[in-house]
Amino acid sequence: MEAGANTARIYDTINLKETLDRAEDLGLAAVVDIPMPKFVNDPEFYENQELFDLMKTRIERLVQKHKDHPALLYWNLGNELYYPYFYKTTDFFSNFNILIDLIHTIDPNHPISTTTIGANKLRVLSIHRKSPNLDFISFNSFGVLSSFSQKLRPIAPIWSGPHVITEWGVNGPWEAQLTKWDAPIEETSTKKAEQIKQRYHDYIEPLRSNNSLGSFVFYWGKKDEVTPTWYSLFGDNKSKTQAVFELAKIWSNNKLDYKGPGLDYVLLNDKGALESILLSPQTEAEAEVFLPVSKIQDIEYRWEIRHESWYKSHESILAEGIHFQKKGNKVIFKTPEKVGPYRLFLYLTNESDYFATANIPFYVLKPNNGE
C-alpha cells in the first residue's frame, strides 16, 4: 500500500478471513484464488464424479463463507489449470461450468475469472467457447509479455474481451539462459528493476486501451524458486530491492531518485556465468563486483555460498565453513570440499532501506573426475 498498490492477489485460502481482514485494514482489495487441481496432471478430479463432488462442496463452503467480505474484489477459479482444448472429449467443460454457475448463484456480486499461461490463442478460444459464463480471462505472462498483444491479435474478431494480467515481472527460470549443467542464470536486482520499469511502460500500460482491467506484478513472499532471490522483492528486516522503488514510482507517480545501491555484474575468476565456471575443491577463488561508474556509492558487501537447489528441492541451503576475505569490491574464498553445483551470492547495502543482489553459479569438480 505504501508503494501505491491498490489490490492484492491471494493464492492461499488457509486463514483466508485473517488475510482478507488484513487487506481491508491496509485499504487493499483482494482477488481470491480458489485452489483447483491442474487438468493436465489430475484430470480425474473433473472426470470422476465422486472426486468432483468433494471439490464442489469445498468450493461452495469457501465462497459461502467469504462472499460478503468487504475486501473481496473477484474470484479466480483455478490458476494455470491447463484448460483443455475445445476438441477434447472430457467432462471437464461441463463440470467447470457447474462450478462457475455455483459461485455466481451463491455470490452474484463478484465476478469470476480463471488464469491461463501466456497468450495461447487456442486455449483462449477454448475458454471463450466452452465457458462463456466466465466474466473475463486472466493471464500470467513473464518474458513473453512483450509479444502478448501481438499473439492475441489474430483472434480479436472472435475474442477481444476484458482481461487481467494476474502475474508479470522478470523472466522466469524457465526463460533464463543456462550453464552447461542446466542451472538457470539469474539477472542482478539492478537489471530486474530495469526490466520491471521497461515492461510496465512498454507492455502493461498500453493494454489499458485494449480491454485490460489491471495487472499484478508477481510477488510470492520470499519464494525460493531456483534461488531465494529470483522473485523476492524484499530481503531481511523489510529491506527492499530497487524493483520495489520502480513499482512505487509507477503506482504513485512520484519523481524521486533511487538512493539505494546498484551493480552491473559479478565475475568469478574473471569469468561470467555464461562461461559455466568449473572450480576444483578447496582451491582459492576470487570474485569481483563491477559497479556503475556514473554512481558514487558508499556500500557494504556481504557474501555467501549456497548449494544449487533447482534439481532436488525448493530450498537453497547455505554452504557452511566458507570464509571470505573482503577487499573492497573483491572477495577471496576457498571453494567447498564437496563436489557439486553451487552459487555465490552477493548482497549490497547502504544507509537506505534498499539492497542490491546478484549471484553466479559454479560447479566444484575434481580435476581427475571425468564426468
Image: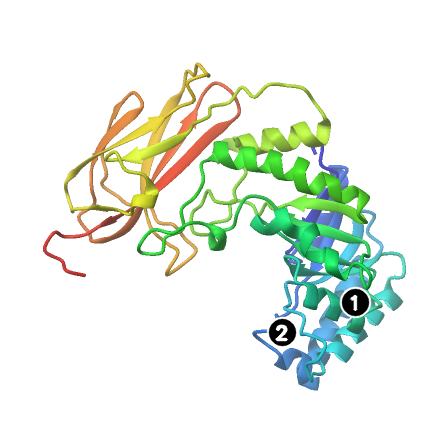
Displayed quadrant of residue 274: top left
Position of residue 90 relative to residue 130, above or below, is below
Amino acid type, callout 2 = Phe
Spot the residue most to the front. 154
- Quadrant the C terminus occupies: bottom left
Residue at position x 35%, y 49% in the image: 317
Residue at position x 80%, y 61% in the image: 159
Distance between mark 1 and mark 2 Cα atoms: 17 Å
Image coordinates for residue 292, horizontal then vertical, percent: 43, 22
Image coordinates for residue 61, horizontal then vertical, percent: 76, 67
Marks 1 and 2, the one that precedes in the sequence? 2
Q: Nearer the viewer, residue 48 or 367?
A: 367
The answer, for residue 186, to whether it is visible in the render is yes
Residue linked to disc 2: 39
Displayed quadrant of residue 279: top left
Question: Could you tell whether 160 is left or right of 46 in the image?
Answer: right
Crowd tier of the residue under label 2, counting other residues whose Cα lies within 10 Å: few below 14, some 14–19, many 20 or above: some
Position of residue 256 relative to residue 234, above or below, is above
Residue at position x 77%, y 53% in the image: 163
Residue at position x 67%, y 74% in the image: 84
Mark 2 residue element:
loop
CB of mark 1 within 8 Å of CB of mark 2? no
Label of residue 128 in the image: 1
Question: Could you tell whether 83 is left or right of 68 in the image?
Answer: left
